[in-house]
Image (cartoon, grey):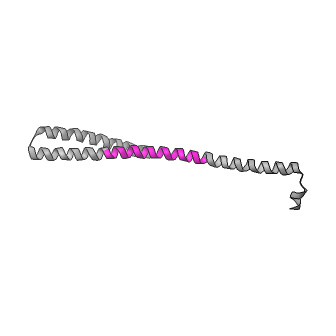
Amino acid sequence: MKAIKNLSVRMKLIAGFGSILLISAVFALFMVNSISEFGTDVNTLESVQKELSVAKDLQINTLNMWQYVTDAALTKENSSLDRATEYLVKAKSDIDKLIDFRKGDS
């Protein structure tokens, strides 16, 4: 304590503002790091949302294909099989997209 009392007012002011400057610099580094992590998290979230959207599309296309196959089995109409084939192509495309997402993650 005596060492602090013996300092001049000028040195006390320099030490006070210096400590505030140091704390501000540390806080700024922390914030830059946090913002960088936030950007990474946002990119990850966007990727997961795209993958989820494709997975939902796959589910819908698979259900539609199944429905048209069932209709074709009951009605013996080729038009139902044609519609089922359309949804099969869409489902295969969705599967390829999901595989590409997984390759991108590796």
Residue at 22% in and 44% down = 64
User: x, y (%) of residue 28?
Assistant: 66, 46
Image quadrant containing the N terminus: bottom right
User: x, y (%) of residue 16?
Assistant: 80, 51
Q: How many marks?
A: 0
Residue at 25% in and 46% down = 62
User: Looking at this view, is 92 or 3 the one in front?
Assistant: 3
Q: Give the residues in magenta.
A: 33-56
Residue 103, located in which quarter of the rendered image? top left
Tell me, yes or no, whether the highlighted magenta stretch contains residue 38: yes
**Residue 79 shows up from this direction:** yes
The residue lying furthest to the left in this view is 76
Residue at 11% in and 46% down = 73
Mainly helix, strand or loop, the magenta region?
A: helix
**Residue 98 shows up from this direction:** no
Tell me, yes or no, whether the highlighted magenta stretch contains residue 31: no
Left/right of residue 24 with respect to residue 8 in the rendered view: left
User: x, y (%) of residue 2?
Assistant: 89, 61
User: Looking at this view, is 27 or 91 the one in front?
Assistant: 27
User: x, y (%) of residue 97?
Assistant: 35, 41
Residue at 20% in and 39% down = 85
